Image (tube, rainbow, N blue to C red):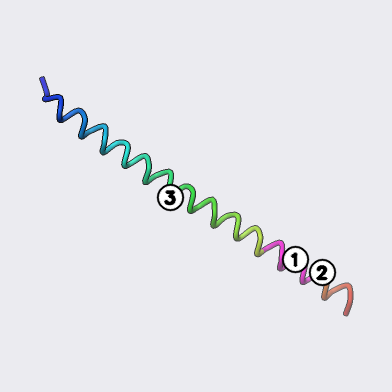
Amino acid sequence: MSEPGNITTKRQLQQQLNERITEEINKINQRKIFTYIYIFIFIYIYLYIYIYL
């Protein structure tokens, strides 16, 4: 049988990995939001120029 200390370290590593993964997913989601905002602003400016000039 494996030692009990071994199991706890495995759990700790898995928890760290899960935290790392969630951080990366959050970063990607933030980038998506920023790109959508930039696209929206670009379209808004384009339409403004197209209509008023």
* Above/below status of 35 relative to 2: below
**Image quarter hosting the N terminus:** top left
Instruction: Look at label 1 and name its amino acid.
Output: Ile
Nearest to N terminus: mark 1 or mark 3:
3
Q: Secondary structure at mark 3?
A: helix
Q: Do the numbered discs 2 and 1 sit on residues whose CB atoms are within 8 Å?
A: yes
Q: Which residue is mark 1?
A: 43
Q: Residue at x 78, y 71 (%)?
A: 46
Quarter of the figure that contains the C terminus: bottom right
Q: Is residue 41 magenta?
A: yes
Tell which of 46 and 6 is nearer to you: 6
Disc nearer the start of the sequence (3/2): 3
Q: Which residue is mark 3?
A: 24
| 37 in magenta | no
- For label 2, the SS is helix
Quarter residue 11 falls in: top left
Question: What is the three-letter code of the residue carrying label 3?
Answer: Glu
Determine the main secondary structure of the stretch shown in magenta: helix
Rounded to the nearest angstrom, the CA distance separating label 3 from label 2 is: 35 Å
Residue indicated by mark 2? 47
Residue 43 horizontal side relative to residue 50, left or right: left
Identified at 54% across, 50% down, the residue is 29
